[in-house]
Image: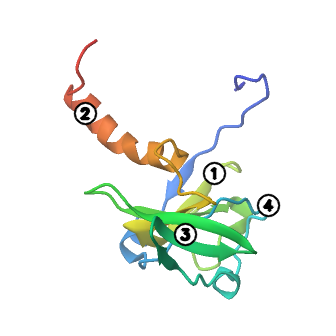
Amino acid sequence: MEGRDGATVEKHRVHLRPATLRDAAPATLHLLPCEISVNRPAPVERFFTPAIRRGPDGLEVSFRGRRLRGEDVMVPSGLVGYVMTMEEKGEVLMGKQEALERDSDCFMEATASFNRFTLWGLEAIPGSDAKMRGALTWPSLAAAVSRGGLPSS
């Protein structure tokens, strides 16, 4: 299969382990305005123990000498957020008996759940145009479309 940019796109099948959704422990999440170019478990709590202050315009904290401002964001009513991990065929953990049918198949499981998180911005609280806020509007938009509740133009 070919993507929009002409590059070959490999098809994958993702198998969800539904039992992990029931067993996912609640987590405290912080969405930081930075990127970490490593994709493996890390002892984040060792390095990020925020001393959050309530300022006149919202939450404030310092991270590596930079001022971050943020606010608590709720997951839309009736929904739950999950922290998910993906296991490729070569990474399937011992003791799990599921068999993958193709090399491109993988398993996904929930490691934690959340109903709110703290959204941080560099020097300013992320505005209503923040990508995360846009993503959180999709469930209500999808529900309105499926009910035919959008006004016609």
Q: Earlier in the sequence, mark 3 or mark 2?
A: 3
Q: Secondary structure at mark 3?
A: strand
Q: Earlier in the sequence, mark 4 or mark 3?
A: 3
Of the numbered discs in the image, which one, if any, rests on residue 105? Answer: 1
What is the three-letter code of the residue carrying label 2? Ala
**Residue 147 pos. (x, y %):** 20, 31
Depth order, front residue of 40/73: 73
Residue located at (43% from left, 75% from top): 24
Give the CA distance from mark 3 to mark 2.
Answer: 29 Å
Can residue 83 be seen here? The reply is: no
Q: Earlier in the sequence, mark 3 or mark 1?
A: 3
Q: Secondary structure at mark 2?
A: helix
The residue indicated by pointer 3 is: 30
Badge 1 density bin: few <14, some 14–19, many ≥20, Cα 10 Å: some
- Mark closer to the observer (1, 4): 4
Q: Is residue 39 above or below residue 55?
A: above
Q: Secondary structure at mark 4?
A: loop
- Mark closer to the observer (3, 1): 3
What is the three-letter code of the residue carrying label 3? His
Q: Secondary structure at mark 1?
A: loop
What is the three-letter code of the residue carrying label 4? Ser
Give the CA distance from mark 3 to mark 1.
Answer: 30 Å
What is the three-letter code of the residue carrying label 1? Asp
Badge 3 density bin: few <14, some 14–19, many ≥20, Cα 10 Å: some
Q: Earlier in the sequence, mark 1 or mark 4?
A: 4
Quadrant position of residue 64: bottom right
- Mark closer to the observer (2, 1): 2
Of the numbered discs in the image, which one, if any, rests on residue 37? Answer: 4
